[in-house]
Image (spheres, rainbow, N blue to C red):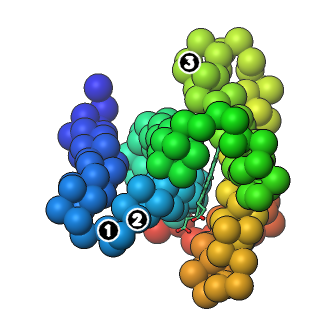
């Protein structure tokens, strides 16, 4: 397999990240409400991984190194896995698995619906991320996987709704999100410098 060590490195780093947070919770380094901090970190981790995944194609164009795109699918699947654990952590630590409270929660935190729509799009992309679906869907596969841009918008909206007044951190993520979209505009793509061959 090409880029085996590189793929393995990405796998280990991204896979170990949440264990580091769990360890921090274990040693009481996450403050008085570690469950809520874990929910937040996993949510932010999902958004960061989505953005990192969306960086791979522009990086390949810029540098000519195919290793970037070789880890793109893995990163996308990790993003989905983080989103699932983010949901599970919310259900466990915030909702306390009290399903009767779900209706009240949705009224109190409507941004959850936005997050759930994002998770649904990630699910569609995850189940069609294999070569078989790629072959079967042909050109439609590419169009379907543009759902990633919708997830980016939904993730940023969900995040904005959570932070509301404190826009400093959010603006940085929104800025990166806009940049990732701008470098995909065909007119911009043509003007981008190419540092490597390929
Ligand atoms: C069913 C799916 C989801 C549910 C139930 C959910 C729920 C939540 C909850 C309860 C919070 C914490 C709010 C607080 O701190 O008071 C949160 C934060 C967050 N979520 Fe989600 N979420 C979901 C999906 C997603 C997805 C798909 C993304 C990213 C694409 C995402 C990104 C975030 C971010 C960035 C935060 C803020 C973290 C911070 O404040 O540091 N969430 N979510």
How far across and down, in percent of the image, does residue 172 sit? 60, 80
Provide the secondary structure element on which disc 3 rests: helix
Disc 1 within 8 angstroms of ligand 1 (CB): no
In the figure, residue 108 lies in which quadrant? bottom right
Disc 3 within 8 angstroms of ligand 1 (CB): no
User: In this rendering, does residue 26 appear at all?
Assistant: yes
Task: Give the answer, above or below, for where 18 lies relative to 125.
Answer: below
Q: Are marks 2 and 1 in contact (CB under 8 Å)?
A: yes
| Mark toward the viewer: 3 or 1 | 1
The earlier-in-sequence mark between 3 and 1 is 1
Around disc 3, counting alpha carbons within 10 Å, would you say few (fewer than 14), some (14 to 19), or many (20 or more)? few
| Mark toward the viewer: 3 or 2 | 2
Please tell me which residue lies in front, 108 or 131: 108
Residue holding disc 3: 131
Could you give the CA–CA distance between mark 2 and mark 1, rounded to whole angstroms? 7 Å
The earlier-in-sequence mark between 3 and 2 is 2
Task: Give the answer, above or below, for where 183 lies relative to 76.
Answer: below
Provide the secondary structure element on which disc 2 rests: loop
In the figure, residue 190 lies in which quadrant? bottom right
Residue shown at the point (69%, 28%) measured from the top left: 124
Locate residue 168 relative to residue 44 in the image: left or right. right
Around disc 1, counting alpha carbons within 10 Å, would you say few (fewer than 14), some (14 to 19), or many (20 or more)? some
Residue shown at the point (54%, 51%) measured from the top left: 94
Q: Quadrant of the N terminus?
A: top left
How far across and down, in percent of the image, does residue 168 sit? 61, 87
Locate residue 187 relative to residue 101 in the image: left or right. right
Task: Give the answer, above or below, for where 169 lies relative to 23.
Answer: below
Tell me the tag on residue 30. Answer: 1
Please tell me which residue lies in front, 9 or 16: 16
Residue holding disc 2: 33
How far across and down, in percent of the image, does residue 36 sit? 47, 60
């Amino acid at each position: 397999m090409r880029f085996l060590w590189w793929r393995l490195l990405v796998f280990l780093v991204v896979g170990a990240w949440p264990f580091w947070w769990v360890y921090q919770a274990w040693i009481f380094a996450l403050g008085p409400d570690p469950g809520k901090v874990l929910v937040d970190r996993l949510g932010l981790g999902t958004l960061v991984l989505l953005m990192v995944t969306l960086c791979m194609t522009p990086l390949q164009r810029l540098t000519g190194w195919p290793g970037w795109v070789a880890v793109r699918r893995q990163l996308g699947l990790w993003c989905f896995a983080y989103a699932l654990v983010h949901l599970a952590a919310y259900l466990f630590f915030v909702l306390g698995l009290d399903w009767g409270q779900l209706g009240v929660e949705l009224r109190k935190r409507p941004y959850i619906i936005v997050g759930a729509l994002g998770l649904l799009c990630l699910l569609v992309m995850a189940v069609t991320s294999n070569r078989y679906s790629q072959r079967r869907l042909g050109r439609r596969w590419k169009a379907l996987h543009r759902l990633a841009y919708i997830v980016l918008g939904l993730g940023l909206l969900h995040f904005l709704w959570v932070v509301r007044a404190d826009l400093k951190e959010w603006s940085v993520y929104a800025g990166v999100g806009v940049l990732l979209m701008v470098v995909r505009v065909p007119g911009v793509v043509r003007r981008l410098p190419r540092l490597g061959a390929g």
